[in-house]
Image: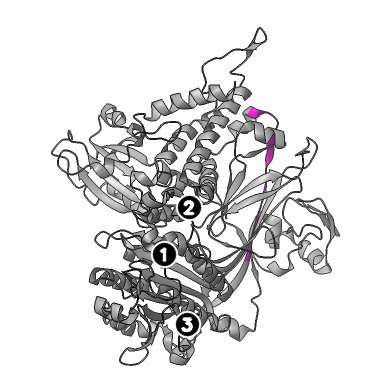
Amino acid sequence: MAIRATVSKFPIDADALEASGLPWGVTVSPFSLTDENGIAPIYGNEGHLLPRCENCWAYFNTYCELEQWAWNCSLCGTLNGLTSHSIARYSHPQSCAELMSSFVDLEIPVDGSEEEAMQARPVYVAAVDLSSSEEFMELTKSALLAALEALAPGSLFGLATFSHKLGLYDVQGPIPVVKNIFIPPEVVDGEPVTLPIELEDAMPLLSFLAPVETCKDRIAAALETLKPTTSWERSTAAGQVLEGVFLGGRGFGVAMERLLNYLGSEYGNTFALARVFAFLSGPPDFGAGQLDTRRYGEQYASKGEDADRALLPEQTPFYKELAAVAVQSGVSVDIFAVTNEYTDLASLKFLSIESGGSLFLYSSTDDSTLPQDMYRMLSRPYAFGCVLRLRTSTEYKPGHSYGHFFPDPQYENVQHIICCDSYATYAYDFEFASNVGFSRHSEPPVVQIAFQYSVVVPLAETSNSKLISSSRPSSSVQRRLRIRTLQFGTAKFFDELYDSVDSEVVLSILVHKVILASLKQGVREGRGLLHDWLVILTAQYNDACKLFPPQNGTPRISPVDVAFSQCPQLQSLPRLVFALLRNPLLRFHEEGVHPDYRIYLQCLFSALDPSSLNRAIYPVLTSFATPDKQAYPRHSLSRAALLTSGSPIFFLDSFTTLIIYYSSTADPSLPFPPPHDCLLRTTINKLKQERSITPKLMFIKGGQDDATAFENHLIEEQDVDGNGLTSIMGFVSFLEEITRNVLEYMK
């Protein structure tokens, strides 16, 4: 569990927080294998017997004062008694994880009988869009074949298709059998219409779900039978015209609704985890949940709508309500959209992100990394059925929480996460509970994160055990409670506060805030919020550092330190804010940013850890003298940096894309592309292994190839001014604009 704070020393009170200009909060990666320093938790058992505070319900931890019969809560100070079992247990501290570390991972009993726990099996269902092209179908088949290779033994797999009908495949016999159920239009004669038959009646669930270890070849054979439906089939089945627009036959909403109910009916008895992979080639346009994509296009000119506001909110609550069904059923949904047409991901995204799934967008089948992403996603460890809870000491409290979770409808600061891998990151910001703050004589501030989750673990085989039969599960479910408790110092002076800043975490909190502002009030408002924050931070910093001392009773205006020269921890922030303003996340609709791509970036950025997000916002540019010798580890993103370095080879990492660029003046004898066994390739392979998604790899030879993809990342040469309006200004002019705004603000 990695936890990083915007400041390692907390502000002493609300006045200090406001005067600093800094956001105050933490990012949490609860299923990370180690903490932020690379230290693993201490593992133990009897997590259900861990003492809890009678007042605030915090868990006992190493910061609590332990007496013979009682303990003091480190969060609220309450004195709690110990049970006889705990007294006996704590008489042998060397055997108790919670006495050895503030980062523990404790096993707790699984609900239900041992037999039920043994029978729990992970379930994966692929829902494939047949209202698509041959290229889409071939890519999806490749992705599912890669998924089959990644699935652990004991998994169950189901194959479903959707178009104007919903198809269920039985692959457990010698020949794949598909049962099709026609999807009705959303409304007939003014009345809502549902499927004529329940999926369980069409095909028993356990006939639909096939054991991967015994049916892999049959599943692969069934995939080969998938063919796109013809436009004639779709139009004949839909048979409807609305205002001259022919309704298609992609009944995605009905298909997902029925599949969730299908899987949810047996959840808890048969399945440890259920995940649905939805492959979409365009917008849902038939049956319940159909989306009107005509809102994207020329209509803004006639209606006078602001495209940067109108295309961000969802147009129907259908998929948000469906996400609640998924959470209730314990089903996580991953959406893979392979399309360059407007699909309204603003409406669809809730189904994935609130159920603990992911949203992927691929604009083309030609260079799509979908198969690699599927394999990578299913190969890494993940937890399911998770509950995340943050607690703080009494002087302060959580404000907003951010991330891909479903908030508990009853308890504050409790989030439900159906599926969580080691990369998934969430964020919280803090506020003071009162004006008192942290008094100079109070205990240090404490944060405690509790993460309860389940994992599928292979059954241990002893030397005298028999091989597990195919009819018996080869894994079981283990329920665990992971707890991390941190104690922070407080900053009595501003220089202490500024020196404790973690700029990557500050950027994470800022990205969450501007995404939220954009969704509520539009992209322009998000840009304005970001720009104003940098102006205020710069002004507060200059004021705190006494860079505007009064002279003869009147303020003396001296040059504004917009580079934060007296505080190295803040120096990267102006560049990061500038880069964020240039990112498609916050660029205007009229600049050519596709609304689905903006939504995809919102979903991606709001789940990344601070270091990955920092790289996605401000890419890392490295230079090499040869493929085997690095020249400089970091350059600014400008053409001037390329020219002055004199290096022939540059490597740019923007998280989603890796670019190797050979300068037009590079020695022709240098091998292009770089050899597979060189240092540059080794660096790339290591980065790809550590990444949550598969980055695209590009090779560009200056003077011969189109270098636009590389040059577009040299953002310090591009145009943005302090007001967020495109102009002829670059980064230097942006700083000058911030300086003028600071002087205006401090008048």
Q: Is residue 486 magenta?
A: yes
In this rendering, does residue 280 appear at all? Answer: yes
Q: Is residue 463 visible?
A: no
**Which circle's residue, 2 or 1, is located before the other in the chain?**
1
Tell me the magenta residue range.
481-494
How far across and how far down the image is residue 678, in percent? 25, 47
In the drawing, does residue 277 fall left or right of residue 174?
right
List x then y, in percent, for residue 49.
74, 68
Q: Residues within 10 Å of mark 2 (few under 14, many from 20)?
A: many
Quick one: quadrant of the C terminus?
A: top right
The numbered mark at residue 377 is 1
Q: Main secondary structure of the magenta part?
A: strand
Q: Quadrant of residue 342?
A: bottom left
Where disc 1 sits, the SS reads helix
Foreground of the two, 261 or 296 = 296
Q: Secondary structure at mark 2?
A: loop
> Which residue is found at the position 27% from the left and 76% from the top?
228
- Quarter of the image with the N terminus is bottom right
Q: Which residue is mark 2?
A: 608
- Mark nearer the N terminus (2 vs 3): 3
Residue 549 vs residue 236, the one in the foreground: 236
User: Label 2 to label 1, Cα distance in Å?
Assistant: 14 Å
**Mark pair 3, 1: CA separation:** 37 Å
Residue displayed at 38% across by 71% down: 285
Q: Is residue 526 left or right of residue 64?
A: left
What's under tag 3, amino acid-wise?
A: Val
Q: Are marks 2 and 3 in contact (CB under 8 Å)?
A: no
Q: Which residue is mark 3?
A: 193
- Disc 1 marks which amino acid? Met
Magenta-span inclusion, residue 10: no
Foreground label between 2 and 3: 3
Residue occupying image coordinates x 34% and y 75%:
249
